[in-house]
Image (cartoon, grey):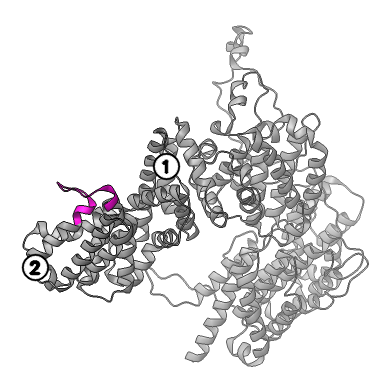
Amino acid sequence: MDSDLLQVRHIVQEAIGTLSVSRDGAQICETLRTIKSYLGGTENPPSMKEKEEFTRNHFTTFLQCLISNLSLDWLEQFQSDEDKELWDCFFLEGPADQTFMVLLDTIISTAPSFRLNKVVDVLEQFLQRAGLSALMWEVCKQQTQAGPSVLQEAILNKVACLPDHLGNKLQEENRPVFFPQNYFPLLGVEMVQVLERISDSLRGGLDCSISFVSQVLGKVCMHGRQKEILNVLVSHLTDHTQSDCIWQRICWRLVESVPDRWVEPVVCGFVQAAAGPAVLSRLLGNLVVKSKKAQFVMTQKMLLLQYSYPTMVLQNLLGYLALDNMRRLLLIKVLKELLETWGSSTAVKHSPAEQQLYISKAILICLSHLKEAEIQSDRQELLTVMMEGMKCHLDSNLPKIRHMGMVVAECVSARVMSEGPALKFQYEEDDEIRDLKTLLIQRPEQIPDSDSQSIGNSRPAMTPSTILKPSVKPQPSASAGLDQGDDSELDSDDDLVPYDMSEDKELKKTKAPTYIRDCIEILTGPEDPDKYEATMSTLESLIRRNVAAAREVSVELAKVLLHLDEKSYVEGFVGLRQGALVAIAVTDPTPVAQFLTSEFYSLNYSLRQRMDILDVLARAAQELSQPFSPKAKQLPSLKQPSIQILPSNSSSPDWQKVVDERIRSKTRRFAKGQSQAKPPSAPNRFGPVAGHFFFPLLRNFDRPLTTFDLLGDDHLVLARLTHTLAILMYFAVNTVVASAMGKALLEFVWTLRFHADTYVRQGLLSSVSSTLLSVPAECLLEDMTEELLETQAWLADVAEKDPDGDCRSLALQNLLLMENLKKKTLET
């Protein structure tokens, strides 16, 4: 061994011995200055070979000696602040990688003491003086000379997990700089500084490795801190790559060098943090083409397996695929896979509505980026998948799913069948649908350069108005009218005051019938539009005014109304017929309910008629359960606070509102302001007849008919049945038959608990809510203990595993109600 190297070893060993035994401040300071000369900054520095020997083989040992001798008495030997800083300089000026490891290992292994506090202080200074960038730069230089080592792997783990180590050790005494929300943005800034040094090195013609920085980025993102670090890193990289090709290549290599096991969080973080597709394209380059892992994440996982990302992320991702010719092949492939998933009946039945909305958004964004030639090349395949998917969506029981399917089918057909007529559906637009349609419009930064240059020569861009709305003929302008001549001004009627016609009533050609039997004769006789309209308009009020006469023909009239075909010339026909059916059911509940429930399972009825029966029973039960008063009799259209039974084209009653209303009514609160008047007390008229409404509906649900199979294809009617039973149970509160109804309903729920249809499961969960709210707690706990325990286990499983968010919410609500029932029983 070289004599100079042996001398370095001898000096270090002698210094360690002196520091271990000496209590002379002057001697200690002189020893430290001697060793510090190997770090530079002295008048007579040792040779480069000696410095390398010290830093490579002896620096870590010397730092450990300094820390092992560290105590309050030992530091008191230093006479001046300059001497005290001499101890710190070894940690702040020496090789950053070894310093960092020694400091962190000491903190992890040291008990609370003066030594621990001093080392934490030094580590804090190390971070504040850009120690992390020096650390990463040291490792990058070492990787250029040799491959990864055990030390580099240990450094990587410590850098990524530093907040965890310090938090576990210091607990409540932790410093703000070590908090994750502060540390990781600082780490992002330090990484930018390292990349700047790498950029300078490359411009100087020197080789440099970036893999360690990539590993740090991947490790931090894998630990769930991509938001904190990438918010800083991406903003700096966006600025640097805007006009510098070297920085673009550095950024591409940074992401490409991330190990495969950490690619997913890094790529997802970049897609979320980028300010647009163009920025993302600069930052990632053609990563999705080069890396199979990145391609899987961007074209499969982020689009088909996850659905929590906002719309902006989808626009970034799909816009990135559209901005390069090599990546556009993946865009077409993605569209086909999205449409295949969208058109899968299994996915429509079992996927959450949120995921289906997410896929619908992705399809529309893909359509906005595709060119006409790309679409026409796969025209037939896209049409086939669209037709299959449209059928699956229209077969769904949930209006939200049906409407999403209509919108996507309209957009796909408009783009694919550009020459022929496109599909057009009738639905009520809401904010969600309007947002979907706006996705067809490309934002300016998403348009490729080649397209933007020739945009003046191309056809107009597709927008929701041009795709989804028929053309409107232009109206003649006001100036054109004025050009016809000056006489038009003389004939103007603008100065005339119009008559007030707000109180005018339309003259009826036919007099409304006065008797209910006359109404039956008109409805069953030859069709006369005027008589039909007059009869349907007055029938409900006739029934409510002439109770005795209505009871004489109640079943006959209900049969006539039930079989009555819709008349398009009668405005509001469906509502008028339903109002009359409800009125006759309220007027003579027992025979009418028996007739309707028996007809529900009879042959030769359409699904629409069977659902009308359920709606009438539910609305009649609601009216019968409310306090009866002459005013209510005179004004049947007066709205009262109650459960809103939704029309037949709606998905389900708002059961959360129902449950909240009942819970609110049972919760004691301190009054604020004037107390409200108590509602009038009256017997529940629904109680004596509730059994006639309820039990016949449970009788034959599992017996298929020739044209009616509740447990088969007619699951929409089954879903409406479950919701109707829940409504009837809810309105049977405080009645004698409530306990028997609740027991039967829980058995019905248990039979269908694993039904595949979301709408059916929502009805079953609503039935459980109604049972818990309407049946007395004593009866529930005494007579239905076994049923409650089974239901509770099922509810826990639904709350954890059901794909539908509304089902999970209802299950949690029911579990809370059960818990409240137990507490209430224990208190009493």
Q: Position of residue 642 (x, y in %)?
A: 59, 66
- Seen at 72% across and 62% down, the residue is 350
The residue under label 1 is which amino acid type?
Ser
SS category of the residue bearing label 1: helix
Quarter of the figure with residue 640: bottom right
Q: Is residue 536 visible?
A: yes
- Seen at 66% across and 81% down, the residue is 791
- Seen at 37% across and 68% down, the residue is 165
Quarter of the figure with residue 104: bottom left
The local crowd at label 1, few if under 14, some if 14 to 19, many if 20 or more residues have their Cα within 10 Å, is some
**Observer-nearest of 769 and 628:** 769
Q: Which mark is residue 212?
A: none
Quickly name the residue at label 2. Answer: 77
**Observer-nearest of 428 and 444:** 444
Residue 40 appears left or right of 186 = left
In the rendered image of this protein, does residue 680 appear above or below residue 647? below
Instruction: Specify start and end residues of the magenta stretch as a single range.
Output: 36-50
In the rendered image of this protein, does residue 450 appear above or below residue 19? above
The residue under label 2 is which amino acid type?
Gln
Quickly name the residue at label 1. Answer: 235
**Observer-nearest of 81 and 450:** 81
In the rendered image of this protein, does residue 320 appear above or below residue 480? below
Q: Position of residue 110 (x, y in %)?
A: 29, 74
Q: Nearer the viewer, mark 2 or mark 1?
A: 2
As measured in the structure, the alpha-carbon distance from the residue carrying label 2 to the one carrying label 1 is 49 Å
Quick one: label 2 or label 1, which is nearer the N terminus?
2
Q: Is residue 517 visible?
A: no
In the rendered image of this protein, does residue 262 appear above or below residue 554? above
**Observer-nearest of 693 and 717:** 717
Q: Position of residue 170 (x, y in %)?
A: 30, 71
